[in-house]
Image (tube, rainbow, N blue to C red):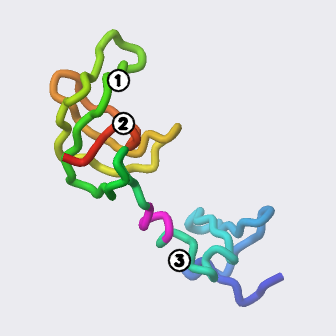
Amino acid sequence: MADDLKCPQCDSEHVYQDGSLWICPECAHEWNPQAVASGSGTEAAEERDVRDANGNPLSDGDSVTVIKDLKVKGSSLVVKGGTKVKNIRLVEGADGHDIACKIDGIGAMNLKSEFVKKA
Protein backbone atom coordinates (compact mmCIF):
# COMPACT_ATOMS: atom_id res chain seq x y z
CA MET A 1 0.00 0.00 0.00
CA ALA A 2 1.01 3.58 -0.42
CA ASP A 3 1.79 4.70 3.12
CA ASP A 4 2.73 8.22 2.01
CA LEU A 5 -0.59 8.79 0.17
CA LYS A 6 -2.81 11.38 1.86
CA CYS A 7 -6.16 12.89 1.02
CA PRO A 8 -5.60 16.06 -1.07
CA GLN A 9 -8.60 17.72 0.56
CA CYS A 10 -8.17 17.09 4.30
CA ASP A 11 -4.66 15.53 4.55
CA SER A 12 -6.00 12.40 6.23
CA GLU A 13 -3.70 9.37 6.18
CA HIS A 14 -6.63 6.91 6.39
CA VAL A 15 -7.33 6.48 2.67
CA TYR A 16 -8.20 3.31 0.82
CA GLN A 17 -8.35 2.22 -2.81
CA ASP A 18 -11.55 1.24 -4.61
CA GLY A 19 -10.77 0.25 -8.18
CA SER A 20 -8.84 3.09 -9.79
CA LEU A 21 -10.04 5.67 -7.24
CA TRP A 22 -8.78 6.46 -3.77
CA ILE A 23 -11.36 7.33 -1.09
CA CYS A 24 -11.01 9.25 2.15
CA PRO A 25 -13.38 7.95 4.86
CA GLU A 26 -13.10 11.17 6.87
CA CYS A 27 -14.24 13.71 4.26
CA ALA A 28 -15.67 11.31 1.60
CA HIS A 29 -13.41 12.80 -1.10
CA GLU A 30 -12.67 10.55 -4.10
CA TRP A 31 -9.76 11.10 -6.49
CA ASN A 32 -7.56 9.42 -9.06
CA PRO A 33 -3.86 9.86 -8.16
CA GLN A 34 -2.77 9.73 -11.82
CA ALA A 35 -5.23 12.50 -12.78
CA VAL A 36 -4.10 14.67 -9.86
CA ALA A 37 -0.43 14.14 -10.74
CA SER A 38 -0.95 15.01 -14.42
CA GLY A 39 -2.98 18.11 -13.56
CA SER A 40 -6.21 16.94 -15.19
CA GLY A 41 -8.23 17.06 -11.98
CA THR A 42 -10.61 19.82 -10.97
CA GLU A 43 -8.57 22.53 -12.71
CA ALA A 44 -9.27 20.95 -16.09
CA ALA A 45 -12.99 20.76 -15.34
CA GLU A 46 -13.09 24.47 -14.51
CA GLU A 47 -11.39 25.36 -17.81
CA ARG A 48 -14.10 23.84 -20.00
CA ASP A 49 -14.48 25.48 -23.36
CA VAL A 50 -18.15 26.08 -24.19
CA ARG A 51 -18.80 27.58 -27.61
CA ASP A 52 -21.96 28.80 -29.32
CA ALA A 53 -23.27 27.68 -32.73
CA ASN A 54 -20.84 30.04 -34.51
CA GLY A 55 -17.79 28.89 -32.51
CA ASN A 56 -17.57 31.95 -30.24
CA PRO A 57 -16.49 31.17 -26.66
CA LEU A 58 -19.16 31.65 -23.98
CA SER A 59 -18.68 32.62 -20.35
CA ASP A 60 -20.84 33.22 -17.28
CA GLY A 61 -22.93 36.40 -17.51
CA ASP A 62 -23.01 36.56 -21.32
CA SER A 63 -26.17 37.27 -23.29
CA VAL A 64 -27.17 34.86 -26.04
CA THR A 65 -29.86 34.61 -28.70
CA VAL A 66 -31.73 31.38 -29.49
CA ILE A 67 -31.23 30.53 -33.18
CA LYS A 68 -34.23 28.22 -33.74
CA ASP A 69 -37.58 27.35 -32.18
CA LEU A 70 -37.09 24.98 -29.25
CA LYS A 71 -39.90 22.90 -27.72
CA VAL A 72 -39.88 22.88 -23.91
CA LYS A 73 -39.88 19.25 -22.80
CA GLY A 74 -42.99 18.29 -20.80
CA SER A 75 -44.87 21.42 -21.80
CA SER A 76 -46.67 22.95 -24.77
CA LEU A 77 -44.45 26.05 -24.57
CA VAL A 78 -41.96 26.95 -27.30
CA VAL A 79 -38.87 29.15 -27.05
CA LYS A 80 -38.99 31.10 -30.29
CA GLY A 81 -35.93 31.67 -32.43
CA GLY A 82 -34.53 35.15 -31.82
CA THR A 83 -35.33 35.12 -28.09
CA LYS A 84 -32.60 36.95 -26.19
CA VAL A 85 -31.42 35.34 -22.96
CA LYS A 86 -29.42 37.46 -20.52
CA ASN A 87 -27.01 36.47 -17.76
CA ILE A 88 -26.35 32.82 -18.60
CA ARG A 89 -24.46 30.40 -16.36
CA LEU A 90 -22.28 27.60 -17.70
CA VAL A 91 -22.95 24.28 -15.99
CA GLU A 92 -22.02 20.63 -16.42
CA GLY A 93 -25.47 19.41 -17.35
CA ALA A 94 -26.77 16.08 -18.50
CA ASP A 95 -27.34 15.34 -22.19
CA GLY A 96 -25.25 18.28 -23.40
CA HIS A 97 -27.34 20.98 -21.72
CA ASP A 98 -24.47 23.22 -20.64
CA ILE A 99 -26.24 26.60 -20.21
CA ALA A 100 -28.50 27.40 -17.25
CA CYS A 101 -30.68 30.47 -17.72
CA LYS A 102 -34.00 32.15 -16.98
CA ILE A 103 -36.25 33.02 -19.92
CA ASP A 104 -39.03 35.59 -19.52
CA GLY A 105 -42.45 33.95 -19.71
CA ILE A 106 -41.05 30.43 -19.35
CA GLY A 107 -38.78 30.40 -16.30
CA ALA A 108 -35.57 28.63 -15.39
CA MET A 109 -34.30 26.09 -17.89
CA ASN A 110 -31.20 24.55 -19.43
CA LEU A 111 -30.12 25.00 -23.05
CA LYS A 112 -27.58 23.37 -25.32
CA SER A 113 -24.88 25.73 -26.54
CA GLU A 114 -25.32 24.49 -30.12
CA PHE A 115 -28.73 26.24 -30.32
CA VAL A 116 -27.60 29.73 -29.26
CA LYS A 117 -25.35 32.46 -30.59
CA LYS A 118 -23.55 35.10 -28.59
CA ALA A 119 -25.43 38.42 -28.58
The majority secondary structure of the magenta stretch comes to helix
Q: Whole-percent x and y of residue 89?
A: 29, 49
**Label 3: which secondary element:** loop
Amino acid at the residue labelled 1: Leu
Q: CA distance from mark 2 to mark 3?
A: 41 Å
- Left or right of 33? Residue 114 is left
Q: Whole-percent x and y of residue 8?
A: 56, 79
The part of the image, by quadrant, that contains residue 20 is bottom right
Q: Whole-percent x and y of residue 22?
A: 70, 69
Q: How dense is the environment of label 3, judged by Cα within 10 Å: few (below 14), some, or many (20 and up)?
A: few
Q: How dense is the environment of label 2, judged by Cα within 10 Å: few (below 14), some, or many (20 and up)?
A: some
**Label 2: which secondary element:** helix
Amino acid at the residue labelled 3: Cys
Q: Is residue 43 above or below residue 80?
A: below
Q: CA distance from mark 1 to mark 3?
A: 45 Å
- The segment highlighted magenta reads 44-48
Q: Is residue 3 above or below residue 90?
A: below
Q: In the rendered structure, are the residues bearing label 2 and label 3 in contact, judged by CB atoms less than 8 Å apart? A: no
| 2 vs 3, front mark | 2
Task: Name the mark on residue 115.
Answer: 2
Amino acid at the residue labelled 2: Phe
**Label 1: which secondary element:** strand
Q: Residue at the location (26% across, 55% down)?
A: 60
Mark 1 or 2, nearer chain start: 1
* Residue behind mark 1: 70
* Residue behind mark 3: 10
87 drawn magenta: no
Q: In the rendered structure, are the residues bearing label 1 and label 2 in contact, judged by CB atoms less than 8 Å apart? A: yes
